[in-house]
Structure formats: structure tokens, C-alpha cells
Image (tube, rainbow, N blue to C red):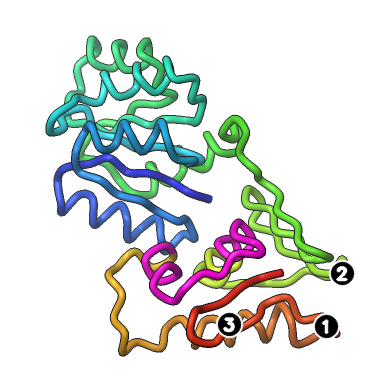
């Protein structure tokens, strides 16, 4: 499940990104309003969390532009502006929820989960399937051949990324930056370690192997 966070305060952004990743979400972050608007309009996300006071373009203008572009993904405003007029303006401009700062991460997480259950992003694929492997991004349920497979949050994120890129070779760099959200260190073996654990659960018990290594390039699920 892909979430975009548009927040210019580095400390707040780091706190939110880390928390969402621990809960198994894939998170894209940008600190500039115009960049955030462009990504929301041109890329596919399942939910957005954004501040109001942002460099170059405020959150209200972003929401209005996104809705005018026909994007219907759930949007949560996260702002220090706690007055009723601001809350009403946010809701009227097209946001689905408005949470004021300071906030508890548990409440933000609960609101995200509630919106995703109630209103999946329009056009978003919530059930992925490759051969006899199925992944439900809302219920977090993975099965193969009808058998339930239990995955850790990062294993789930890794599998979701592979399944959304079925037939496409993804490099170690792409995987690290998408799943773990930090710059790639060529010395790390985190991808190999997690991929090995994922294969133990997804491929080892079954005759047909879905995850393939493409030497010198990365991995592909097909």
C-alpha cells in the first residue's frame, strides 16, 4: 500500500515515515508543495498525508488541484492550524480527514486504516495475483495455492513491490529505496537477506518458483 507524505518539517516527516514503514506501508516523502502536487497528480498512491503550510504551494491549493485533476485517493490533512475555519476549508476543498498537530502517531495510523478500509483509492488494485500467489493489500493477507502465508511487514512490502512489477527486473537499488526509504549502500546485504527469507516462505514449499535472480541486474517475479 503506497502512501505519499507532503511535509516540510524534517523531524515530523522522519517520525511519520518511520512509523508507517514499521506498519508495512511504502512511503514516498517530499517537502515542497509543487513537487507534492505533481507527484499526486502523475503517480499512483493509495492515500496522501499533507501539511497545509508548505513551501511554494499550500496544502489547500494542492487538494483543490488534485481533485480537479480527477484524483479520488483519500487525503488526510496534518496541520498546526487548528481553527474551525481552516478545518472547514480543508474539508470543503476535498480532504477526507483533518488531524491537528501535535498528534499521536497511533491516532494518525488509525485514521489511515479507517480511510483505506472505507474508501480504497479509485482505480487502485487492492488484490494482486501472480499464478497461484495472491496478496490483498487491505487485509494484509497472502496465500499461495490456497494456503495462508504469514509475512513480516518488510517481507510483505517487498512482495507487494515485486508483484506490482511482475515481469519487470528490479534492481537492489530500486528495492532498497522503495521498501526501506534510504539511499542505497552497495555494501549492505539487506536485500539478499530479506529476499532469502521471502523465498523460504513463497517458493520453497512449492514446485514452481516465482522469484528469479537476474545476475548483474536484480530480481524479477514472473
Q: Nearer the viewer, residue 215 or 164?
A: 215
Query: Label 1, label 2: how many angstroms apart (C-alpha)?
Result: 9 Å
Query: Label 3, label 1: how many angstroms apart (C-alpha)?
Result: 20 Å
Q: Residue furthest front?
A: 216
Residue at coordinates 34% horizontally, 16% vertically from top-left?
A: 64
Give yes or no for contact between labels 3 and 1 (Cβ–Cβ under 8 Å).
Answer: no
Mark 2 vs mark 3: in front: 3
Relative horizontal placement of residue 95, taking residue 219 as reference (left or right): left
Determine whether 121 is above or below 113 in the image: above
Whichever of callouts 3 and 1 sits on the residue coming sooner in the sequence is: 1
Q: Which residue is label 3 attached to?
A: 214
Q: Inspect the magenta stretch and tell me whether residue 149 lies in it.
A: no
Secondary structure beneath dot 2 equals loop
Q: Which residue is label 2 attached to?
A: 145
Residue at coordinates 76% horizontally, 62% vertically from top-left?
A: 130
Q: Which residue is label 1 attached to?
A: 206
Mark 3 vs mark 1: in front: 3
Residue at coordinates 25% horizontally, 26% vertically from top-left?
A: 59
Residue at coordinates 66% horizontally, 83% vertically from top-left?
A: 199
Q: Quadrant of residue 97?
A: top left
| The magenta segment | 160-178
Q: Quadrant of the image for the C terminus?
A: bottom right
Amino acid at each position: 500500500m503506497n502512501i505519499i507524505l507532503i511535509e516540510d518539517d524534517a523531524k515530523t516527516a522522519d517520525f511519520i515515515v518511520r512509523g508507517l514503514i514499521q506498519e508495512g506501508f511504502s512511503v514516498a516523502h517530499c517537502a515542497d508543495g509543487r513537487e507534492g502536487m505533481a507527484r499526486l497528480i502523475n503517480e499512483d498512491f493509495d492515500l496522501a498525508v499533507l501539511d497545509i503550510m508548505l513551501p511554494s504551494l499550500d496544502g489547500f491549493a494542492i487538494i483543490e488541484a488534485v481533485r480537479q485533476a480527477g484524483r479520488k485517493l483519500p487525503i488526510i490533512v496534518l496541520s498546526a492550524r487548528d481553527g474551525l475555519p481552516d478545518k472547514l476549508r480543508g474539508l470543503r476543498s476535498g480532504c477526507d480527514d483533518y488531524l491537528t498537530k501535535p498528534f499521536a502517531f497511533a491516532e494518525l495510523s488509525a485514521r489511515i486504516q479507517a480511510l483505506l478500509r472505507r474508501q480504497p483509492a479509485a482505480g487502485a488494485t487492492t488484490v494482486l495475483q501472480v499464478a497461484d500467489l495472491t496478496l490483498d493489500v487491505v487485509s494484509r493477507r497472502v496465500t499461495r495455492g490456497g494456503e495462508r502465508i504469514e509475512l513480516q511487514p518488510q517481507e510483505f512490502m517487498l512482495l507487494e513491490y515485486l508483484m506490482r512489477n511482475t515481469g519487470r527486473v528490479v534492481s537492489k537499488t530500486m528495492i532498497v529505496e522503495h521498501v526501506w526509504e534510504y539511499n542505497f549502500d552497495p555494501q549492505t546485504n539487506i536485500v539478499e537477506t530479506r529476499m532469502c527469507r521471502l523465498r523460504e516462505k513463497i517458493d520453497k514449499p512449492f514446485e514452481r518458483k516465482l522469484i528469479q535472480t537476474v545476475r548483474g541486474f536484480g530480481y524479477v517475479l514472473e
